[in-house]
Image: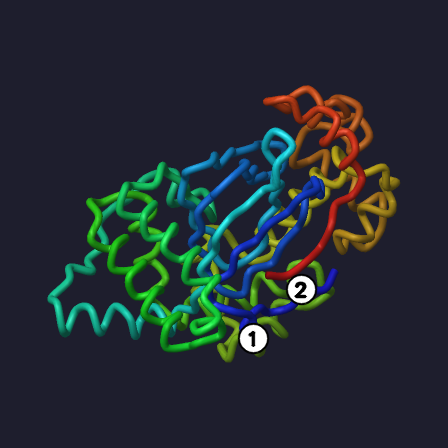
Amino acid sequence: MNFLANDSHATIVKYVETNYAGIQLLHHSRCAVGYIVRGSKNIYYGDSRYTISRGEVFYLGVGNHYIEDLPEDGRSFEQIVVYYSPEQLQRILLNLNMNYSINITNSHLCDQCRRHNHVSLPATTTLRNLFNHVTSFLYDDNFIHDAAAENLKMTELIYTIVSMDECCLRSKILSNVDAAYGNFEQVIYSHIFRDISIEELASKSHRSLTSFKKEFKRHFSIPPHRWFIRQRLMQSRLLLISTSKSISEIGNECTFPNTSHFIKLFKKEYGMTPAIYRSRHSNFLLSSCENGHDDQIAAGLGRLQSSAV
């Protein structure tokens, strides 16, 4: 499974999707802050689902995301997304701190911030007005692909969020300040589904093996080998409930050396074989859908897509 970086793409993008596309696997090489204009977005961690509703602002970190964008009442799904790199964020925060003495300390900690690579919350009036203004900005031919104008809008967005009281969104933004960590994380996520040794990963991240293992455990809490297995098993869970691919195909796609090894690790992690898991969760997406999207979701089963944004 190949993932592409999005560094050459626009900073501010409005997405309009008229048709339901099913669950998609996206890889972010930059962080993203977005706003749901119409419809709703589901974020999946295995078979756990988190819904971001219309009028909410969200954060998606660097790495893999399993998302499902749902149109609303026959109308298109719409969202505005602002992408940024740790280096861009550092420049903006430095400017805000030097010129306006903005507080950029981050003392917020909660389970949501630690466990998930996304957060969402209802947009404040200021954030809602900001994104509405961004929509007008995107339709102005004088500002399309204008890097200076985009930077001003991104600075305004970061300023607005950093000026908020302590919350998950503010904490996630400020946690991106460490550019070295962002680069380290990007190397890790881009090799989840590749047959690569820990020694090769250490080399690609420009660290000794000992330094790599220590930094990996500091950021991900568990050793590299266990973390990679868990990520691949999480992917396999979603494929089991959202596609008709065979057990062996899924094991191969998730980079397990053979089917028996895949089944053994899956059973050890989840207490049942992949076949039993699929049987018990075969109606997961259909039974958990809400708001009249049954036909859309049924049509989307088996269409797990891989793309980059």
> Residue 84, percent across and down?
43, 66
**Above or below, comparing residue 274 to residue 95 in the picture:** above
| Along the line of sight, the residue nearer the viewer: 213 or 61 | 61
**Above or below, comparing residue 100 to residue 25 in the picture:** below
Question: In the image, 189: left or right of 244?
Answer: left
Question: CB of mark 2 within 8 Å of CB of mark 1?
Answer: no
Q: Earlier in the sequence, mark 2 or mark 1?
A: 2
Q: Mark 2 highlights which residue?
A: 3
Task: Estimate the spatial distance between the alpha carbons at disc 2 and disc 1, rounded to whole Å.
Answer: 14 Å
- Residue 119 falls in image quadrant: top left
Query: Which residue of the protein is positioned furthest toward the left in this rendering?
Result: 101
Question: In the image, 140: left or right of 239?
Answer: left
> Residue 305, percent across and down?
73, 50
Q: Residue at x 59, y 50 (%)?
A: 16
Kind of residue sitting beneath label 1: Ser
Disc 1: CA contacts within 10 A as few (<14), some (14-19) or many (>=20): few
Color theme of the render: rainbow
Disc 2 versus disc 1: nearer the observer? 1
Q: Residue at x 28, y 62 (%)?
A: 156
**Above or below, comparing residue 299 to residue 59 in the picture:** above
| Along the line of sight, the residue nearer the viewer: 264 or 39 | 39
Disc assigned to residue 8: 1
| Along the line of sight, the residue nearer the viewer: 143 or 94 | 143
Kind of residue sitting beneath label 2: Phe
Q: How many marks?
A: 2
Question: In the image, 58: left or right of 43?
Answer: left
Q: Residue at x 42, y 67 (%)?
A: 181
- Residue 73 falls in image quadrant: top right
Which quadrant is the C terminus positioned in?
bottom right
Q: Residue at x 77, y 29 (%)?
A: 298
> Residue 24, percent across and down?
67, 47
